[in-house]
C-alpha cells in the first residue's frame, strides 16, 4: 500500500495523519531496534457489512516521516 484512500503517503510528516484522520484512538510510543516510532491507530465501522477496519500508521520519530500504513478488517462479534 503506497497511500491511503484519503491521500496519506509514505514519507509524509507524522502530523499529517492527524490532519487527514483526526485524533487517533490510542497514541502509542514504541522504542526498539534502529530507532523510535509512534503508532497512530484509527477504528472505522463498516456498518451493515459487520466488519471493523483498523488503520495503523507508524511514524519514524527521528525523520518525522510515515514509514508503515497497515489496514486490517475484522468481524464484529454479535452479542
Image: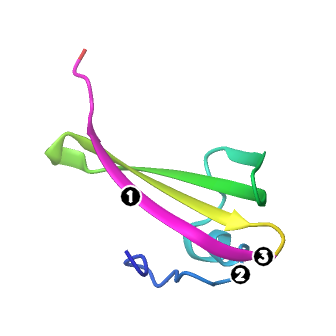
Q: In the image, residue 39 lies at what x, y percent?
A: 65, 54
Residue found at x 15% / y 46%: 49
The reply to whether discs 2 and 3 touch (Cβ–Cβ < 8 Å) is yes
- Region in magenta: 63-78
The reply to whether discs 1 and 2 touch (Cβ–Cβ < 8 Å) is no
29 or 50: nearer the eye? 29
The reply to whether discs 1 and 3 touch (Cβ–Cβ < 8 Å) is no
Q: Is residue 70 magenta?
A: yes
Query: Residue beneath label 2, please?
Result: 13
Whole-angstrom CA distance, mark 1 to mark 3, is 21 Å
Does label 1 or label 3 sit earlier along the sequence? 3
Query: Residue beneath label 3, please?
Result: 64
Residue found at x 70% / y 77%: 65
Residue found at x 16% / y 45%: 48
Pick out the residue farthest to the left: 49
Instruction: Label 3: state its secondary structure.
Output: loop
In the rendered image of this protein, does residue 22 appear above or below residue 9?
above
Q: Is residue 48 found left or right of 58 in the rendered image?
A: left
Q: Is residue 66 found left or right of 4 in the rendered image?
A: right
Whole-angstrom CA distance, mark 1 to mark 2, is 19 Å
Query: Residue beneath label 1, please?
Result: 71
Amino acid at each position: 500500500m503506497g497511500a491511503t484512500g484519503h491521500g496519506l503517503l509514505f514519507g509524509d510528516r507524522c502530523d499529517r495523519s492527524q490532519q487527514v484522520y483526526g485524533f487517533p484512538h490510542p497514541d502509542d510510543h514504541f522504542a526498539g531496534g534502529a530507532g523510535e516510532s509512534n503508532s497512530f491507530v484509527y477504528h472505522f465501522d463498516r456498518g451493515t457489512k459487520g466488519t471493523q477496519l483498523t488503520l495503523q500508521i507508524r511514524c519514524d520519530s527521528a525523520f518525522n516521516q510515515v514509514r508503515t500504513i497497515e489496514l486490517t478488517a475484522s468481524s464484529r462479534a454479535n452479542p
